[in-house]
Amino acid sequence: MPLATVFSRAKLGVKAPLVTVEVHLSSGLPAFHIVGLPEATVRESRDRVRSALINSRFDFPVSRITVNLAPADLPKEGGRFDLPIAIGILLASAQIPVKAVDGYEFIGELGLSGELRAVDAALPAAVQTHHVNKVLILPASNAGLAAIVDSQHLREAQSLLDVVAHLQGQSSLPFGSDAPPGTGTTKTIDYPDLSDVLGQQTAKRALEIAAAGGHSLLLSGPPGTGKTLLANRLAGILPPLNEQEERDIAIVQSIAGKPLNLHRPFRAPHHTASAVALVGGGSQPRPGEISLAHGGILFLDELPEYPRKVLEVLREPLESGEVMISRAAQQLTFPARFQLVAAMNPCPCGYDGDPTQDCRCTPDQIQRYRQKISGPLLDRIDLRITVPRLPPGVLQSLSAGESSAMVRERVCAARALQLIRSGDCNANLSATEVRQHCVLGQQCKELMVKAEQRLGLSARAHHRIIKIARTIADLASEPKITLPHLQEAIAYRGDF
């Protein structure tokens, strides 16, 4: 038949919209045209497809070939449409039967020899194909998706010849694999242990509360007091990922072209990173650091050294858990439900309030330094802790504290209570859910009124303190928030 239809999936953020690949062979001078808003890489597929078909010993039609990628208003990029275009040409030229492609969708870039090469954002396509109960044929080099998607809906191929042989019933493509070499999906990470940090019991307690409730955390103190050491140990006490978190993290990694790694991300961008590097963007928007930290930790060391306009882009994602990138042609939304952990010195020289060394900064310099962090951003950070320097000679006399495994056991128990109660961690509770699940007694209400008057708390800070108190109660396996829980929560809203 001179007309054939094959289905594929486009790359559009975390989504993978359906693309209908229509191939028409007509009489006239030999030509090969691709329409449907293709970018340069898609238009170049004409040469890749032609060479792949010839080198795979198929007949390349000597006719006028028109390929339409529908819908026409959806931008198409990359080499992911090479395979469906080649299959469409073989269908239109009657080299394979039409019914052979029923129930299949295709993505994959072709080499000139007919070899299939990996494409970015294969996982969103696999998820969408699974939802419509079809089978996705994709390159074997995109292996590992079966860790997220049912392998029965995935078939992996090494070359165009393998795909055609499968469609014609001459051989069978293997189902999707879930443990390819080098992906890290089965690798156990040895996180740094919390017992390495000597002393700093208040900071360790704050770290445990942050892990249990998913709260953001700011550590302030002189150089060398263990702020970075503490932050690097947060990942080791977090609960394991659930199925939905694994899928969301894997989709972001797939879009960004990162190897599949089903562990909580820990992203620590340098303070010279731009706003675009943090949020994401580009002519074809890609996820930034805050999306790559989705489901995990975003650690910003030396917080005031980041440009203020870079820090301000964190405000909306901290509230909504997502980031929208707008371009002239499209708007894309990437997930950004990360746990912010930041560290800073109290002043430019780092020794303000340090009992062992005098500060060389003037009051104006200290004020300007701290004002690099805006009030609205600081208001969104739940726990604000000072990490003091230990007195001389004390460090040698301290013994190792609790291990990460011991703390993680309590964190997991507290997080389990939260999931049963509200289906999410306490940090993500809405105002309505706070009123429903974080009921205060009369004494607690009176204390909150005094705290609001003395500390000048905003409505946001009010809710965040109550959510911290709820987490503290969960760690103690208490069904209600009591006065000691609330007092401890208020104490963690340090004056910065």
Image (tube, grey):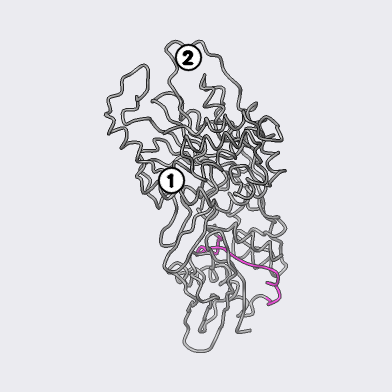
Label 2: how many residues lie within 10 Å, few (<14), some (14-19) or many (20+)? few
Write the start and end of the magenta stretch as one range.
Answer: 97-116
Which quadrant holds residue 365? top left
Residue 61 on image: x %, y %: 55, 80
| 468 relative position to 325: left or right | right
Q: Residue furthest bottom?
A: 28
Tag 2: amino acid = Leu
Residue sitting at x 56%, y 38%? 465
| 244 relative position to 32: left or right | right
Residue 27 position (above or below residue 423): below
Q: Secondary structure at mark 2?
A: helix
- In the picture, the disc for residue 395 is 2
Residue marked by disc 1: 376
Residue sitting at x 57%, y 30%? 487
| Relative depth, front residue between 446 and 437 | 446
Residue 325 position (above or below residue 186): below
Tag 1: amino acid = Pro
